[in-house]
Amino acid sequence: MLDNLLKKLVHWLDPKLEKFRTRQSSTTPPKFTPKSLEEFIGVLQRTPKSILSSRDRSRIAAIMSFDDRKVESIMIPKSKMVFVNAEEILGPLVLDKLYKSGFTNFPVVDNSDKVKGIIHTEALNALEIKHTDRAEKYLDKSVYYLHINDSLSHAVSEIERTNSYYFLVLDHEDSLAGFFTIQMLLDYLLGK
């Protein structure tokens, strides 16, 4: 996998270096393609900042460390999550709280804090909510889980397998630890 990753990175980096190559004389040696991770890192270190920005370097570092990263390193922890009780009435105050949170998915829990499903704001936006509607009415019971020690590669395979973009994350004791989304993964890879 690392060889394939190096080839993709070199392919992405090559056009950025082309401008630099054209400034060189005609005696410039032919294009160099690194054959190992060490050679690739050497090319990165020698590449001027005018060609490869700090943000580009961060993206490359994120991609290169992808297999070693765990879900825990980019997830949102439980303490920052916004929950909805299944019996809660989706009136203006609750909806305002959900929209102001900035999240687009909310775990719905019962009175014993057991997750019953997820509410997606897109579902709330598409429906006419009555002041007497309870959260349970808009519940998506498809809930997918990852563990905090799962690798980001495993998360990608789960995204592909489930076709889901939102996962609850469990800790070592299978208790809720946070949540993980495909957007977090993309932001990580893009250096945001």
Image: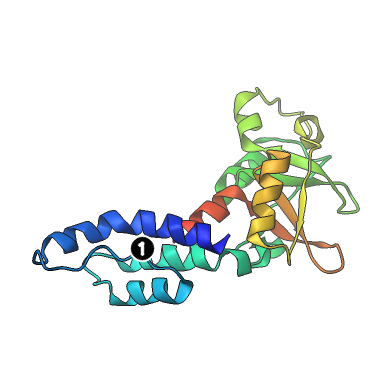
Q: Residue at x 44, y 55 (%)?
A: 8
Does 178 sit left or right of 173 as displayed?
Answer: left
Which residue is identified by label 1? Answer: 56
Q: In terms of secondary structure, where does tag 1 sit?
A: helix
**Amino acid found under the numbered disc labelled 1:** Asp
Q: Residue at x 33, y 59 (%)?
A: 13
Does 147 sit left or right of 56 as displayed?
Answer: right
Does 155 sit left or right of 188 as displayed?
Answer: right
Total number of numbered discs in the rendering: 1
Q: Which of the 4 quarters of the picture holds residue 108?
A: top right
Q: Residue at x 71, y 35 (%)?
A: 90
Q: Which residue of the protein is positioned furthest toward the top in this rendering?
A: 128
Q: Which of the 4 quarters of the picture holds residue 54?
A: bottom left
Q: Nearer the viewer, residue 90 or 116?
A: 116
**Crowd rating for badge 1 (residues with CA inside 10 Å; few <14, some 14–19, many 20+):** some
Q: Is residue 188 visible?
A: no
Q: Nearer the viewer, residue 1 or 87?
A: 1
Q: Does residue 150 sit above or below 140 in this rendering?
A: below
Q: Is residue 111 visible?
A: yes
Q: Residue at x 75, y 41 (%)?
A: 118
Q: Nearer the viewer, residue 150 or 144?
A: 150
Q: Could you say where residue 192 lies in the image, as x and y percent from the top left?
A: 44, 59
Q: Nearer the viewer, residue 40 or 148?
A: 40
Does 34 sit left or right of 187 as displayed?
Answer: left
